[in-house]
């Protein structure tokens, strides 16, 4: 397949890197010139299990020279979704599939408004990545699950072909006929560690050594599960601590949550699309969400301290 990864930061490069190794023509698009130049000059360096390997990749800061692709994987930050997909409409042809693997809720609706609902698949991935330097990432794809599905729950040929291609590349991928439930299950994992990692500045190894952090995480997930239940969402997660455990499964202790990585790169976080989604849905369905509201306040306080003009 010809594939374009929009938002090829650490996670996008981890996914795009293994797809490239499996023989697909993958374009990694990132607005950061230093990151793109490093990949073009030296290849993408992927560290896994303490060992670096180099993958020759296509990389660009925009989509102008790419042409129509078979699959667009959207991994930009939530607040950039509309801007980025609008600027990339030229790579979406009649048979192009646009797959969101972003954190949070609501991206598929934005994508559908821009390119048409018939092009859009939704999904969630538990794979991870950390940017070590421009063109150099710590990859966490091995054994980490990715779930994709049609918005109407059908088991279409295209979604099964994409899953098969991902699996062949070593990305453990399943097709879901309950993608909204799948998205909520992933949201629970982000709720468990995202805001807490951002607010504390801790890596997974340290985050999981503090009992009070675990208690707070479990309380936040319990609120989110109550909201999902009130909204009629069918969850695969059966108890709150399950999300806390799943969040770090298979990842090395030096891994950092994506919200913390955003702060360290000088960017605001996606907290409004993760814990914020829980609070908004809670208000809609009459479910109190004080723990998530407190976590949002903490993260926004950090953002205020770091980015106040």
Image (cartoon, rainbow, N blue to C red):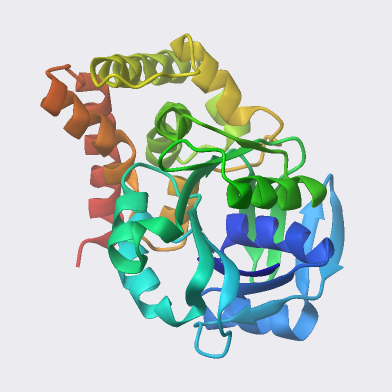
The quadrant of the rendering that contains the C terminus is: bottom left
Give whichever of 73, 195 is nearer the camera.
73
Give whichever of 199, 45 is nearer the camera.
45
Residue at 25% x, 37% y is 276
111 left or right, relative to 36: left
Residue 28 percent coordinates (x, y): 62, 72
- The answer to whether 11 is drawn above or below residue 142 in the figure is below
299 left or right, relative to 127: left
Residue at 37% x, 42% y is 104
Does any portion of residue 74 appear in the rendered image? Answer: no
276 left or right, relative to 54: left
- The answer to whether 224 is drawn above or below residue 258 in the figure is above
Does any portion of residue 236 appear in the rendered image? Answer: yes
Residue 179 percent coordinates (x, y): 46, 34
Give whichever of 96, 54 is nearer the camera.
96
Residue most extreme to the top: 239
29 left or right, relative to 57: left
Residue at 56% x, 90% y is 65
């Amino acid at each position: 397949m010809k594939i374009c990864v929009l938002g090829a930061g650490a996670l996008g490069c981890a996914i795009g890197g293994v797809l490239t190794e499996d023989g697909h023509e993958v374009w990694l698009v990132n607005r950061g010139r230093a990151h793109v130049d490093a990949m073009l000059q030296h290849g993408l360096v992927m560290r896994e299990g303490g060992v670096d390997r180099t993958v020759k990749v296509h990389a660009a800061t925009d989509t102008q020279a790419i042409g129509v692709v078979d699959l667009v994987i959207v991994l930009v930050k939530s607040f950039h979704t509309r801007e980025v997909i609008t600027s990339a409409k030229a790579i979406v042809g009649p048979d192009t599939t646009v797959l969101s693997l972003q954190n949070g809720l609501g991206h598929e609706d934005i994508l559908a408004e821009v390119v048409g609902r018939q092009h859009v698949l939704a999904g969630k991935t538990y794979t991870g990545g950390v940017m070590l330097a421009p063109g150099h990432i710590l990859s966490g794809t091995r054994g980490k699950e990715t779930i994709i599905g049609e918005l109407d729950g059908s088991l279409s040929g295209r979604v099964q072909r994409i899953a098969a291609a991902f699996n062949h590349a070593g990305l453990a991928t399943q097709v879901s006929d309950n993608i909204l439930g799948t998205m909520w299950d992933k949201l629970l994992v982000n709720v468990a560690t995202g805001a807490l990692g951002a607010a504390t500045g801790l890596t997974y190894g340290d985050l999981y050594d503090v009992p009070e952090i675990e208690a707070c995480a479990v309380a936040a997930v319990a609120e989110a599960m109550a909201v999902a239940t009130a909204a009629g969402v069918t969850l695969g997660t059966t108890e709150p601590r399950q999300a806390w455990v799943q969040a770090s499964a298979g990842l090395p202790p030096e891994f950092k949550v994506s919200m913390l990585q955003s702060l360290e790169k000088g960017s605001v976080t996606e907290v409004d699309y993760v814990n914020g989604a829980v609070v908004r849905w809670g208000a809609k369905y009459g479910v109190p969400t004080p723990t998530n509201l407190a976590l949002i306040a903490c993260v926004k306080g950090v953002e205020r301290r770091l980015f106040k003009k």
